[in-house]
Image: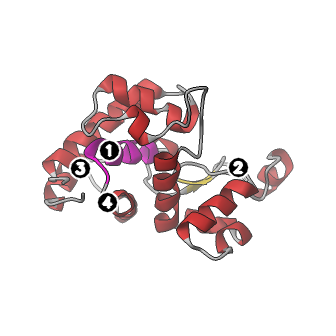
Amino acid sequence: MSLGKPAEFYARVRAGILGPILTPDEVAGCEAILKAMEGLPLSHAAYALATAYHETNGTMEPVREAYWLTEDWRKKHLRYWPHYGRGYVQITWDFNYAKADDKLGLGGTLKAKPDRALEPAIAAGIMRWGMVEGWFACDKVGRHTLARHLPPVATLEQFKSARRIINGVDKDLLIARHALQFQAALQAGGWA
């Protein structure tokens, strides 16, 4: 599944969540995410876009954990430094970097150079596989995955539930509302 009418998708996000002017970085971020989400249902792509929008403070660019602070601060305060949060979903810990490195076939370069998680294609790949395979959270029922929480076209409540894939219920309603906007834009763009 991919966009059949990209101009309609971008017109819709320009008129809504990412508008009124799209920056080249916003477009590049959307492109990387949409490429990574190809083959997945509409709601899955919408939720990935909404998650990235939220986790990057609306920039659609992969970011560092506590990006407003210094590297010295991160080194001193984050027990998993240098494998602190980066990307669209803030992957953390060396073993998660190693898992992502293996899944994406990066030959050890992601674990050795964690800043590679800031490359849009890598950040989007981490987000896709982490959400599809449930890398980030589980409960007594099992792993929180896109398939567990979202049908092909989702409602507000289903998008709220999907927040458990990344971060419990933190900001679940806000992100669900973003997901609905992205879902409508993807529908306009002919995601199929």
Neighbor class of circle 1 (other Cα within 10 Å; few <14, some 14-19, many 20+) is: many
Q: Secondary structure at mark 3?
A: helix
Task: State the residue lying farthest toward the front.
Answer: 141
In this view, 36 is above or below 17? below
Neighbor class of circle 2 (other Cα within 10 Å; few <14, some 14-19, many 20+) is: few
Disc marking residue 14:
3
Taking the spot 60% from the left edge, 49% from the top edge, the residue there is: 90
Instruction: Pick whichever of labels 1 and 3 is earlier in the sequence.
Output: 3
**Left or right of 130, for residue 49:** left
Instruction: Pick whichever of labels 3 and 4 is earlier in the sequence.
Output: 3
Q: CA distance from mark 3 to mark 2?
A: 30 Å
Residue 63 seen in render:
yes
Q: Secondary structure at mark 4?
A: loop
Q: Secondary structure at mark 2?
A: loop
Disc marking residue 149:
none
Residue kind at label 4, given as amino acid type: Glu
Residue 56 seen in render:
no
Label 2 sits on residue: 69
Taking the spot 48% from the left edge, 64% from the top edge, the residue there is: 120
Instruction: Pick whichever of labels 1 and 2 is earlier in the sequence.
Output: 1
Kindly check if marks 1 and 3 are in contact, taking CB atoms under 8 A apart as contact.
Answer: no
Q: Which residues are magenta?
A: 40-53
Kindly check if marks 1 and 2 are in contact, taking CB atoms under 8 A apart as contact.
Answer: no
Q: Position of residue 89 (x, y in %)?
A: 54, 48
Asked whether 53 or 110 is in front, the reply is 110
Kindly check if marks 4 and 1 are in contact, taking CB atoms under 8 A apart as contact.
Answer: no
Taking the spot 35% from the left edge, 27% from the top edge, the residue there is: 158
Residue kind at label 2, given as amino acid type: Leu
In this view, 27 is above or below 184? below
